[in-house]
Amino acid sequence: MAKYELSDVKAGSLVGEIHEDTVEFYHKGELCEVDIKYKTLPFVESDALHKRMNDNEDVAAEWISKALVDGRGKQQFTEHQVKTVFIQSLANAIFNKVWGLDSIKKAMKEQADEKKKE
């Protein structure tokens, strides 16, 4: 488990962190994968997107476009590009990753596995 000091948080070390991952999605009935780089958005951005999402506003393309970056942290896609060049299964898979849903699912599975051991 990683441990951070509040002084690190205050210095902004968690914001904009670039993560590398592989995302799986289906295309033409086949399991495919794509390597992505994405950054952690600051709370002010992610909280605003969460609020809009909870008000039933479609924010997935905007969230994906803000999060996907190159190795230097430069945005890779505009919101319009995400809407027009991504297929649904790819957008869903990437959104789950950048929104953090994958992390939540993994944590819940680990908790369930621990309970089974008890």
Image: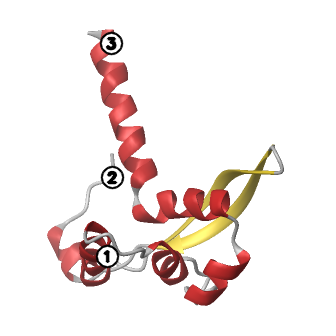
**Dot 3: few (<14), some (14–19), or many (≥20) neighbours within 10 Å?**
few
For this orientation, the residue located farthest to the left is 6
The residue lying toward the viewer, choosing from 111 and 29, is: 29
Tag 2–tag 1 contact (CB < 8 Å): no
Circle 2 SS class: loop
At 27% across and 55% down in the image, what residue appears? 3
Q: Amino acid at mark 2?
A: Ala
At 50% across and 59% down in the image, what residue appears? 97
Instruction: Check residue 2 in the rendering and tell me which mark sits there, or answer none.
Output: 2
| 66 vs 92: above or below | below
Residue 30, by quadrant, is top right
The residue lying toward the viewer, choosing from 37 and 67, is: 67
At 61% across and 88% down in the image, what residue appears? 80
- Residue 78, can we see it? no
Residue 20, by quadrant, is bottom right
Q: Please identify the quadrant where the N terminus is shown.
A: top left
For this orientation, the residue located farthest to the front is 56
Circle 3 SS class: helix
Q: Which residue is mark 3?
A: 116
Q: Which residue is mark 1?
A: 46
| 16 vs 116: above or below | below
Cα separation, mark 3 vs mark 1, equals 34 Å
